[in-house]
Image (cartoon, rainbow, N blue to C red):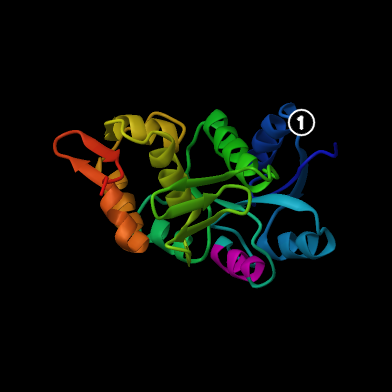
Amino acid sequence: MNKLRILVVDDESRMRKLVKDFLVRKDYEVLEAGDGEEAMEIFYNNNDIALVILDVMMPKMDGWSTCREIRKISDVPIIMLTAKSEEHDELLGFELGVDEYISKPFSPKILIARIDAILRRTNNLDSNSVVTAGIIEINKAAHIVTVNGNPVELSFKEFELLQYFVENKGIALSREKILNSVWNYDYFGDARTIDTHVKKLRSKLGEGANYIKTIWGMGYKFEIDEK
């Protein structure tokens, strides 16, 4: 099996080397670019890139502009790296189609965990990966969710969150457990992060939103009402 190819885009050579060293240890093939223009040239010349790690602040073409250009021609997973941590920057990333958003400084092990999780999903070709929960159907291989047969557009994180709920149907889940499981690392921050994602997920699920029950003071539970 060919190695999965990852494009690392950052104007700091030391950062590129740090990320590359960890990726190579995990048996990924790595391409490097020092700015957005170089990244696009590499991307145009390689049609088998499995994932892009993209820094925000770069010369010539910044990360936002590079992300926009990539999204014009490809749905390849993108992880955005940034020194900024303001909420509006994170929201902009998701609006542009970023799959994951990690603020510097970060643990390389956390970055690798997120890469592994994304690539497991996007490269999963199991034809028996369709899960049904009430009126909701999740096709894990195609990364498609339908409610009453109608397709629903979810971000990568919303998709992961819904899948986690369905896999733990009927179990009371604390916010801490959801964050640690879905985000794949210990989260030290405001519980509003999970509440915000649940709110967005519910708004997209229509009638299926009722399956996500709030457990006041604790978290949530996915439960299908028996009629």
Residue 13 percent across, percent down from the top left: 68, 43
Q: Is residue 16 magenta?
A: no
- Left-right relation of 77 to 146: right
Location of residue 126 (image quadrant): top right
Q: Residue at 44% x, 30% y: name it.
A: 185
Percent position of residue 89, x then y: 40, 59
* Depth check, front residue: 150 or 220: 150
What is the residue that sits farthest to the front in this orientation? Answer: 227
Q: Position of residue 130 (x, y in %)?
A: 57, 47
* In the depicted structure, whether residue 172 falls above or below residue 101: above
Q: Which residue is mark 1?
A: 27
> With 205 as the anchor, is 219 left or right in this view?
left
In magenta, the rendered stretch is 64-71
Q: Which of 97 and 227 lies nearest the eye of the viewer?
A: 227
Instruction: Name the foreground residue: 43 vs 197.
Output: 197
Label 1 sits on what residue type?
Asp
